[in-house]
Image (spheres, helix red, strand yellow):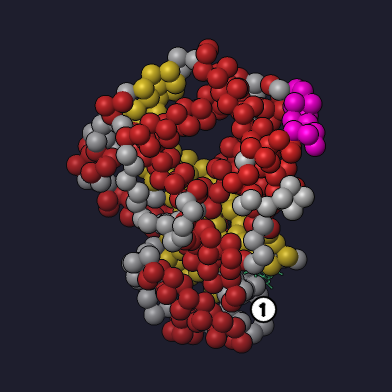
Amino acid sequence: MQINYAKKEISCKLVYYGPGMSGKTTNLEVIHQKVPDENKGEMTSIATEGDRTLFFDFLPLDLGRVRGMTTKFQLYTVPGQIYYASTRKLVLQGADAVIFVADSQAEKMPENIESLKDLQDNLAEYGIKIDEIPLVLQWNKRDLPSALPVEELDAKINWMKASTVEAIAATGEGVLPTLKTAASLVLDRLNAKTPGAPPPAAAAAAPAEEKKQEVYVSRVNHDQISRSYFNQYCQLQYRINAKSVPVEDFKKFTLEEKKKLLESLINYVLILQDAKKRNIKASKEEVDKQVAAFVKRFNSQEKLDEFLQSRKISLDNLRNEGTKNIIIGKLIAQVIPDLGERTKITEHDLRAFHESNAALFGGKSFDQTKNEALAAYKNHMKRALLEEFYGKLREQARIEIFQDKL
Ligand SMILES: Nc1nc2c(ncn2[C@@H]2O[C@H](COP(=O)(O)OP(=O)(O)OP(=O)(O)O)[C@@H](O)[C@H]2O)c(=O)[nH]1
Ligand SMILES: [Mg+2]
């Protein structure tokens, strides 16, 4: 759960878990249909095959104000099929509550139990006990003839005595009550943790980090960069770019490294400010496409999961990176209209580039490494153009760096 007292915003993550075909995606679809437009974002399904979820579904919801705080819920479903074990674990990370969608049919009991056991194991890996996390069991598919009586389901599956809700997700029945139950479990817990209103009353109960006064490391025009945001940025960049895996949990940066990273963050803030002025945005579809392209680069689900996990990169990180790339790409195309011309590469230039960067190509001949050289050269030119653009933005910007706060 993320609490931003400055923005008065709480963001919670709910994960729909359960065996394959139990109705998790259907739950999200129903919520998406029933919730008024102003309270929901777009529903995203990343990588699906037929109606089977291969990666995850995602739906952001705005559930209004609770005790003066805007509450946002991020809904995720996991892929139920057995072989996506590592994706399930990844999606589960940071969940504030779990909705376990069980298939009520008698013949599905072994699958329900196996999936619940899988949930228990995955939670344990994050140091959470299944009877400690807010959990709702949804008895779904009540309409089917072989559905077991709820008492029997309760006896067979609900040994942790979680709240239960009956549902026929296919017709929408029970879907919102399930969501409401989960949401109120999360909010109850939140209230228990932070009695009274948020600061100053809640300050005593809030974790030490949130109590601290915000410290700023830089100001870029009208935007301030807080130290906590900057630290997060540093860690994320490190995890994304790290050459060796597995990545250590926390990297301590030297002042020099921090200064360099702050420069790159300032560039990014300048880009965003400029993009905003030009009304350049990344649409949900574009971000989906970016993420999907990224997913495709890995030959298998397992490999992708391995990569993300070893770098401790979350799905939200992935989407944010995608958004950033799209915006930068659009901006560059707009501000450098002759981009194509300027990045045209002649054979002569390429040979010269290959020669002066021989070490990059392991001493191999031009013909042997022509494709690699071309890719490297293109990258090099793009970076140079970006630097040029950053330079222009910086000339017009007001930038302050508070080095003693780094
Ligand atoms: N009869 C009946 N069918 C349902 C119900 N809920 C969902 N279904 C159907 O069950 C099938 C699977 O539903 P999904 O929501 O895609 O299942 P899922 O849990 O997301 O499955 P995975 O993505 O493979 O993990 C679909 O054909 C749904 O229409 C229900 O309450 N009753
Ligand atoms: Mg699904």
Residue 233 part of the magenta-drawn span: no
Question: Residue 284: x, y in percent?
Answer: 66, 42
SS state under label 1? loop
The C terminus, quarter of image: top left
Q: Is mark 1 within 8 Å of ligand 1?
A: yes
| Residue drawn 42% across the image and 66% down it | 135
Residue 107, compared with residue 180, is above or below; it is below
| Residue drawn 42% across the image and 57% down it | 247
Residue 151 in view of the camera: no
Residue 143 in view of the camera: yes
Magenta stretch, residue numbers = 337-349
| Relative horizontal placement of residue 391, taking residue 187 as reference (left or right) | right
| Residue drawn 38% across the image and 65% down it | 126
Residue 346 part of the magenta-drawn span: yes
In the image shown, does 399 or 284 lie closer to the viewer?
399
| Relative horizontal placement of residue 243, taking residue 77 as reference (left or right) | left
Question: Mark 1 — residue?
Answer: 144
